[in-house]
Amino acid sequence: MRHGRRALPWLAALLALVGAAALYRQGELARLLTLEQLQASHAALLGAYEARPLITLLAFFGVYVLAAALSIPGAVILTLAAGAIFGLGVGLLVVSFASSLGALLAFLAARYLLRDLVQARLGKSLAPINQGIAREGTAYLLTLRLVPVFPFWLINLLMGLTPMSAGRFYLVSQIGMLAGTAVYVNAGTQLAAIRSAGDILSPGLLGSFVLLGLFPLLASRLVAWTQARRRYARWPRPARYDRNLVVIGAGAGGLVTAYIGAAVKARVTLVEGHRMGGDCLNSGCVPSKALIRSAKLAHQLRKADGFGIRGATGTVDFAAVMQRVHRVIRDIEPHDSVERYTALGVEVLQGHARIVSPWCVEVSLADGAVQRLTTRSIVIAAGASPVVPAIPGLREAGFLTSENLWSLTELPRRLVVLGGGPIGCELAQSFARLGSEVTQVEMAPRVLAREDPEVAEQVAASLRADGVRLLTGHQALRVEQDAQGRRLIVGQDGQEHGLDFDQILCAVGRAPRVTGYGLEELGIPLGERGTIQTNAWLQTLYPNIYAVGDVAGPYQLTHVAAHQAWYAAVNALFGRFRRFRADYSVIPWTTFTDPEVARVGLSQAEAIAQGIPHEVTRYDLADLDRAIADGVAHGFVKVLTVPGKDRILGVCIVGEHAGELIAPWVLAMRHGLGLNRMLGTIHTYPTLAEANKYAAGQWKRAHAPQRLLRWVARYHDWERR
């Protein structure tokens, strides 16, 4: 019996599809749902309605339900026709119920024909959408119904693939489509009144067209106002604001946000609870690059014989290396200092910030005082902190992260690095070059999992050449310690073995800082990756609270945080006039190993996985004059393009100074310049940057017009006669 019931919706959907196909094949339904046909039949339809009102209404109702259920173009025409034939009151009543019933049938067809298949194949990817529909599906659907951004037929089908109940879908659709239906039915009543060309300029008809154009804007404003009112209802709004903008966190995102706000003369307060400059200056980008530079110099000294420099020696003084690292930090500190930002017009408070309402931030200052700030907008730029894996015995044994690593003054003789991402690879190679016995442990089959396999293999080969013992496909199980010392137990294929170490460095990723400053109390939700949920304008649940940088995602990159900061600052200060969507279309990044790995756009692996047609052009640096002269003739430039065209989809560079060489490609992709433009640009000889031009030349040769060239060859043969 259960199977029989389940088969009924399938049968109904199938019969409806067959019926629609038959009607379309005969051309009857397609011919009917045109404005010209309805205008031509207007008098006849009015006569039929006057003669047999009930039958005419039922017939019109059935046609409308069928058109809506089968997502056939013409629903708008039918809505206008309802106003023209039945008038505003009856027309609105008929269309309102017919459109909602048709939408429900389309919803049910998608649910019973497609939902199980789609959820089975894409369930993991759709999980956040399913959770969002379960949590706020009513508000989301109501917004889509009131603001016709997407076609209604598409909404019907897509909602059928989600967990939303049919009853809720029908009720929300009935209410949500009512306002738009009224506007279109009213327009139909005005169209029916046209008797001559002069009637086109009648106030009623012009007003209806103006209302049609303004409705989406007015509806979107109404929805936004209603949602905001509901969200802000429990928070008292201040009578006036002390600040235009309060920024929490003085890393890259917070500093740039505050800078932009002060530059446009807003009153801005920047709150930092630790050190100005954030992680990038104090424990990330700056100190790691200073360490990499010292390690690279030590490596070059050991290779000096190959350049004809005999007897070059160098003893690594690790304490002096770390002193230089801290000196570099001190030299850059003034760029991010309190003094500099105060001079720019930013009020800087050093203390712990807590958001106590959408318009109020409490700051606990170092002297114990508490300052309460009211502000029109808030930008959260709290950054991220290193992830410490839950490995038994790790905390008892002690460990290093990118935060406390820089307090070392003695080079670890035996160092274990957990993690094969960019941070793990950079630091493993640097410590190996400085003299540590480094073992790097990575659970995945290879390091740099986000890069193409050939890229990861070239970096892995370089790590091994520098003495790193690379254990991919190994899982860290536990840390043991006894009188003989400390060891990490790792496992692979059911086999365990121990790695003795003096220090163990956790470089398995970074987690956004989302606790301790009021998100929980305000109910601001987090995304799947633990970042603060934001929309395309970087707004959180509360439209006047924004998030940027590592705490917002989707990239944990300093330059992306600064990029987002512009959008957040401008939207927060001027959003009532115009808002800007954050643009992530062209995001470059670099892993500062030796060789460096730089990328922008699609990788080849991503293009294959996403089914994106592409061509690959590769230029090996082994052929580049400057690379040969410098002794760095290894690596390549790989460019992905649209098949048959020079439009760039992505670029990956592996080699010396790849992070610098990627810049022209970022510019080209950002402004739509193709490989022909790159080839036509003069590059200084001899430079590493010529590799970019030669890569474009490789593409050009592969796409040379061979047929034309054969005719040109014949022409030259003729000229020699």
Image: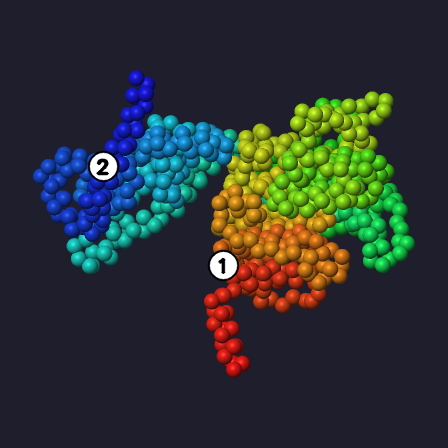
Please provide percent x and percent y for residue 650: 56, 52
Q: Quadrant of residue 531?
A: top right
Q: Quadrant of residue 633?
A: bottom right
Along the horizontal axis of the image, is 322 left or right of 490? Answer: right
Q: What secondary structure is found at the residue carrying circle 1?
A: loop
Q: Nearer the viewer, residue 103 or 91?
A: 103
Q: Residue furthest bottom?
A: 721
Please provide percent x and percent y for residue 79: 25, 43
Determine the residue positioned at 35% across, 48% down.
Answer: 214
Q: Residue 599 carries which label?
A: none
Q: Nearer the viewer, residue 275 or 482?
A: 482
Q: Which of 50 and 160 is in front in this view?
A: 160
Along the horizontal axis of the image, is 394 left or right of 179? Answer: right
Q: Residues within 10 Å of mark 2 (few under 14, many from 20)?
A: few
Which quadrant: the N terminus?
top left
Circles 2 and 1: CB atoms closer than 8 Å: no
Q: Look at mark 2 in the image and give the residue it sits on.
A: 19
* In the depicted structure, whether residue 269 falls above or below residue 682: above
Q: What secondary structure is found at the residue carrying circle 2?
A: helix
Determine the residue positioned at 76% across, 34% down.
Answer: 416
Q: Look at mark 1 in the image and give the residue it sits on.
A: 645
Which numbered disc, 2 or 1, marks the residue that appears first in the sequence? Answer: 2
Determine the residue positioned at 73% across, 49% down.
Answer: 594
Q: Residue furthest front?
A: 721
Q: Which residue lies furthest to the left in this view?
A: 51
Q: Which of marks 2 and 1 is in front?
A: 1
- Callout 1, which amino acid? Lys
Q: Which residue lies furthest to the right in this view?
A: 311
Give the Cα separation between the discs numbered 2 and 1: 45 Å
